[in-house]
Image (cartoon, rainbow, N blue to C red):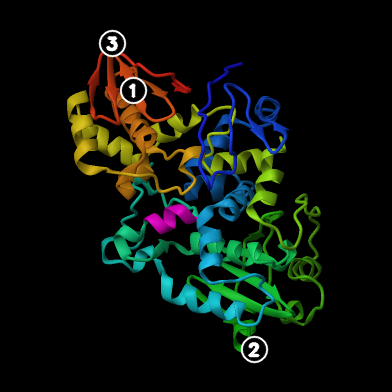
Amino acid sequence: MKMYIFINYFHKDAIHPTAEAVGFSHNNCNFKEVIIDESKGIDEKDILTVVNRWHEELYNESQMKFLPSIVLANMMDPVTYEIIENLDIESIEDKGAVEKIINWANESIIHTQTLDIFKDNPGKDPWGVGNLLPAYKKLLPSEMKAMSIYSGEITGKCSSIARLLSSVFRVSGVKSRNIVLLRMPSHTISLVKIKDIVYLINNQNIMKVNKKLIKDLSELQFIGLYNDSVIVNNNIKITKEIFKSKETLLDSIIKVNNLNISKTDNHLKDKFDRKDLSDMIYKSSNVKFSLAKYAYQSLYVKRPELYLKASLRSPKAFELSNKLNTDEEIFKWIKENIKSGSIFKDFNERIMIADQVIVLKTGGLKDKAILAYSLLKRNGYNPIIKISRKNAYIKYDEKIYDFKNKKMINSIKEEVKLILKD
């Protein structure tokens, strides 16, 4: 079993305030034990799927089984809480809370393919093309916020927008069984039930469901649904009986469609905070929660080296590696094209991968090291990343590059806390 030295970071917004050399301590939870147990039942391919989050892998190969983990990662992302805090929402049942979210979404979210740079259909996808198909990466809230470099606003495609807004409602107090994300062959919408009123989320538009919308929805064929707790792969009809029912939204859909699905395995209160959610995810070796940690791109995982593999798979890294052939060209390009700073507010405990650094044009020291690793590896080098508390280095062919000082050095003078190699 591989063991790693983990970063001992301190950050006011971090979920994990302290870390020890090999095993973490998180709210009296022994992280060494959690990390060791994490591997049971988790395939490497599954981890790469939730880290890269490409449309074809998430929806076709997996039959949606990874989507609850992606939703949980959305619910844990600081941007979700930032939105709620900026809207000054204590509870979704407060007067005017729903209207605040409706107005904010309409004014502050943009669909990627409405932008001139990405408007072509099937789309000049910003995340590149692999196996002749656009990646159509499913974004976390932090990625959507970082995409504002192209639009000035939070930006994503339909399913990313639906997950973000559903997560805002969920964190604001809506029960899991009153939120469903509904899949069509080329679109995703969401339904949210609050005080017997059902709202439709369709891209950045949130509408109270009326008779016309009920008729429109009843004429559509949905190929599945999911939320943070369940997935349904069956064909589903949304009928007027669902909107008349006093049961939860999910239970109404189950009854109308004669579905048989398992009960939720989440144990969150109706109203919870980020600490409650992170405690549930990080204290469990459950496969869904473990995959949520990887989807979140947390460093508190057993196999952080898989972030390197996910980076190497990136179409954007592949494209760039064909343009940059030497180590000098690689470091020069990163220095000239990538700004300093992670897209993640909780950057001390998360790591970006290569395609994020390229597309979003920014990255912290360890994120730039991930990109350099991918480019060097694809050009025949054998790099190793070494991370200290305040710096990141990459070692290859008896050379060492210092990312903080942007130069080659002879040796690393400080203690290395994390080593990453494929």
- Residue 21 higher or lower than 187, as above or below: above
Is 76 left, or right, of 399 in this rendering? right
Q: Give 311 or 390, whichever is nearer the viewer.
A: 390
44 part of magenta stretch: no
- Callout 3: helix, strand or loop? loop
Where does the image place residue 76, in percent across and percent down from the top left? 59, 51
Q: The disc labelled 2 sits on which kind of residue?
A: Lys
Where does the image place residue 105, in percent across and percent down from the top left? 48, 73
Residue 332 shows in this picture: yes
- Callout 1: helix, strand or loop? strand
Residue under label 2: 211
The picture quadrant where one finds residue 383 is top left
- Residue 365 higher or lower than 144, as above or below: above
The picture quadrant where one finds residue 215 is bottom right
Q: Give 147 or 83, whichever is nearer the viewer.
A: 83
Is 50 left, or right, of 157 in this rendering? right
Identify the residue at the far top of this view: 398
Q: Which residues are magenta?
A: 141-146
- Callout 2: helix, strand or loop? helix
Q: Give 45 or 185, whichever is nearer the viewer.
A: 45
Residue under label 3: 398
145 part of magenta stretch: yes
Residue under label 1: 394
Q: The disc labelled 3 sits on which kind of residue?
A: Glu
